[in-house]
Amino acid sequence: MTLRGNLRAGSVLAVLVGLLVAGCSQGGPATPAPTPDVQTAAPTAATGSLDDTRWEASQLGGSPVLEGSTVTAAFGADGSLAGSGGCNRYRTTYTTADTTIAIEGAVASTMMACDQAVMAQEAAFFTVLADARSFAVTAEELTLSDGAGAALVVFDVQPQEVAGTWVVTGYHDGDSAVVSTVQGSTPTVEFAEDGTVSGTGGCNQLAGSFEVDGNAIKIGPLASTMMSCEEPAGVMEQESALVVALESAATYSIEGDHLEFRRADGVMAATLTRG
């Protein structure tokens, strides 16, 4: 059987051999060689700054956020503010000075329709953003308040734990776009605490290593088994492109149960949801 990829680390080879043995015998999989622990969470910015921080709302207007909905805010060091209103994705810009904040641009969002209660909450959240005049931030919590000092929305810091199992929902096709996965296939990726990564592209088993430093990530090189699958149609092309997309990832971000990988040039490499 031939391996695809350059197995530079002994731990990668050990993981792949374990996968092959598990698929061809009734015995348990081989135990991979240990690898050094890796950091799996991106830290927030220093207390007092919103730059490069990510948050999930816990309270809006003094009431808990609706159960089952996820309202997020990601503050970029470049003055960008983006996230989810609970139904739609939104984007705007902001400025801060000491503890004051101003949302400078109109809040632009997608136009999806959701449950009426979620839509009402989202509209209230967008209004809150426009009304925010000050902020108070710690390592764990962010509060936006109005001009009178009344709290408008309270956020909890959003964990950036990449460890776990993720289901791929989209990947860069190597041409010009991120495309959805082939219907009838379920490509998955699992990041382990020991720095190994495994999964499937929809046909073959994948194995490799990864490293995290802040929100920077390096995946691979990835190796795979060399099975050939005729169904579902397009799964082999998907698998090849997915391996390239994952190996091209330079940064990552997590919002709720959604994970995004981006290349060094900022182009989206892959999108995933927590499995």
Image (cartoon, grey):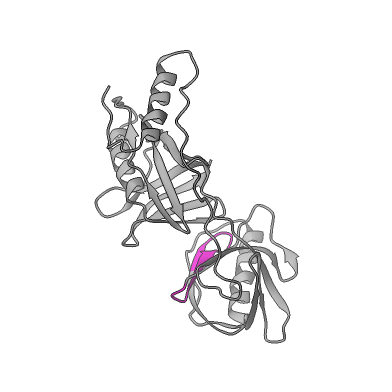
Q: Quadrant location of the N terminus?
A: top left
- Is residue 177 at least partly visible in the picture? yes
Between 223 and 13, which is closer to the camera in this rendering? 13
Locate residue 2: give its quadrant.
top left
- Is residue 186 at least partly visible in the picture? no
Instruction: Please report the bounds of the magenta region as a residue range.
Output: 77-90
**Could you tell me residue 214's position as x and y percent?**
48, 59
Q: In this view, does 127 lie to the left or right of 269?
A: right
Q: In this view, does 140 lie to the left or right of 260?
A: right
**Could you tell me residue 24's position as x and y percent?**
40, 16
Whether 198 is drawn above or below 53: the answer is above
**Could you tell me residue 7's position as x and y percent?**
31, 35
Q: In this view, does 233 lie to the left or right of 104?
A: left
Whether 136 is drawn above or below 68: the answer is below
Locate residue 72: give its quadrant.
bottom right
Considering every residue shown, the one lying at the far right of the view is 62
**Does the magenta portion include 41?**
no
Considering every residue shown, the one lying at the far top of the view is 26
- Give the residue at x 41% y 19%: 21
**Does the magenta portion include 79?**
yes
**Could you tell me residue 228's position as x and y percent?**
28, 25
Whether 199 is drawn above or below 245: the answer is above
Whether 136 is drawn above or below 196: the answer is below
Task: Tally the marks.
Answer: 0
Between 159 and 211, which is closer to the camera in this rendering? 211
Locate residue 263: give its quadrant.
bottom left
Between 136 and 112, which is closer to the camera in this rendering? 136
- Give the residue at x 67% y 82%: 146
